[in-house]
Image: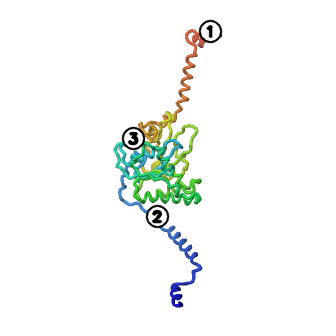
Amino acid sequence: MDEDRYKSAEGWGPKDPHKKLRERIRKQQEKEDRRVVPILRSPVNEPAEVAERLFNDVWRTGEVALLFGEPGVGKSILAVNLAEAIAGNADTVLRMCEETTPAARRVVYIDLQRTDDQWKRRFSGTFTQTAFERLHLDWEDIDPSADDGIRSSRILASIIDVILGGAEVVILDDITMGGINLGRPNGPLRTLRTLKMFAAESGASILVIAGARPHKRPLSASLSDVAFRHIAEQADSVFCLAASTYGPAFRYIRHLRSCVAAVEFDASNVLTFHFKSNEILFLGTTEESVHLRDYAAEAGRAKEREQKALRKPKGVVNMLMSKEYWKYLKGE
């Protein structure tokens, strides 16, 4: 019995009272070592790879693009049509924007807004069979009592797994759900920075969708309209989807920023579309001012001018009311 007792005690030693302190010092030292490792490099004399167009000159391969717009303007409809077109659906009308048919790519659409049932009700009959892969949040696997930062970190880690898993094109709808601490602007900004880092590592192209501040009257689109303004400064390309005053079904896209090329679709040359249910028809390009005019007020003013012209005296009365007649009465 004593021999068995001694054998069970082999390898035993007293607990290290400073184990936690040593572990904390080790982690701190690793952090300090990472801080001094340089991350800046000199440019190499190799030619740059030619970027291919994913959505005209607005979004190219290797870029982290930002699409923003007011609530209800149709950002998700545009993003789904883009995903279908890039994935190789030749029937998608958005391909009319392109001069040549781009090659089909593996597209993953990450829908953080809708459940699977909501997606089916929203796009039933239009995108029942999609050429792209769609992922949505598993709400049953999310602990409602967990900290908001923990939930957002899990979402961001899942998005990174998709990027590193071989997806060529990733569309994130939208970034506010993937941000750390949703109530602060730093959350989406940190998310976008992380996505840019992993996109540069994997070569994936990412489209991030964000909201915009609503306006009481039509105004020209600008970068300051993004709900989280700082993410517009970090994105490689930024474009806005806005409603047109020409009619409730008309929309236009204005390109606001590009880090690699000149902006072609500016205020003088915006892309115009007609939204019908979940389908989009490309109408061509026009000036942004056409979509900002108050057509109802212009029609009202034109009607007032017509009524005023009908009330205006004619013939002899006009002669009597002329300046010559008043001079005659004054004896001039």
Quadrant position of residue 324: top right
- Closer to the observer: label 1 or label 3? 3
The residue located at (53%, 74%) in the rendering is 26
Name the foreground residue: 17 vs 39. Answer: 17
**Residue identified by numbered label 2:** 39
Residue type at tag 2: Ile
Q: Which mark is residue 2?
A: none
Q: Earlier in the sequence, mark 2 or mark 1?
A: 2
Q: In what element is the residue under mark 1?
A: helix
| Residue 207 at x, y percent in the picture | 45, 50
Nearest to viewer (mark 2 / mark 3): 3
In the image, what residue type sits under mark 1?
Tyr
The residue where tag 3 is placed is 93
Would you identify the image quadrant in which residue 92 lies? Answer: top left
Q: Earlier in the sequence, mark 1 or mark 3?
A: 3
Residue 155 in view (yes/no): yes
| Left or right of residue 5: residue 332 | right
Mark 2 Cα-neighbour bin, 10 Å: few <14, some 14–19, many ≥20: few
Q: Nearer the viewer, mark 2 or mark 1?
A: 2
Tell me, for residue 328, which label it has, or none. Answer: 1
Q: Position of residue 174 (x, y in %)?
A: 50, 50
Q: Is residue 232 visible?
A: no
Give the image location of residue 32, x and y in percent.
53, 70
Say which label, 2 or 3, has the lower sequence index.
Answer: 2
Of 273 and 228, the residue lying toward us: 273
Element on which disc 3 rests: helix
Residue 305 appears at what percent x and percent y?
55, 22
Instruction: Rate crowding at label 3 as few (under 14), some (14 to 19) or many (20 or more) other CA atoms within 10 Å.
Output: some
Q: CA distance from mark 1 to mark 3?
A: 72 Å
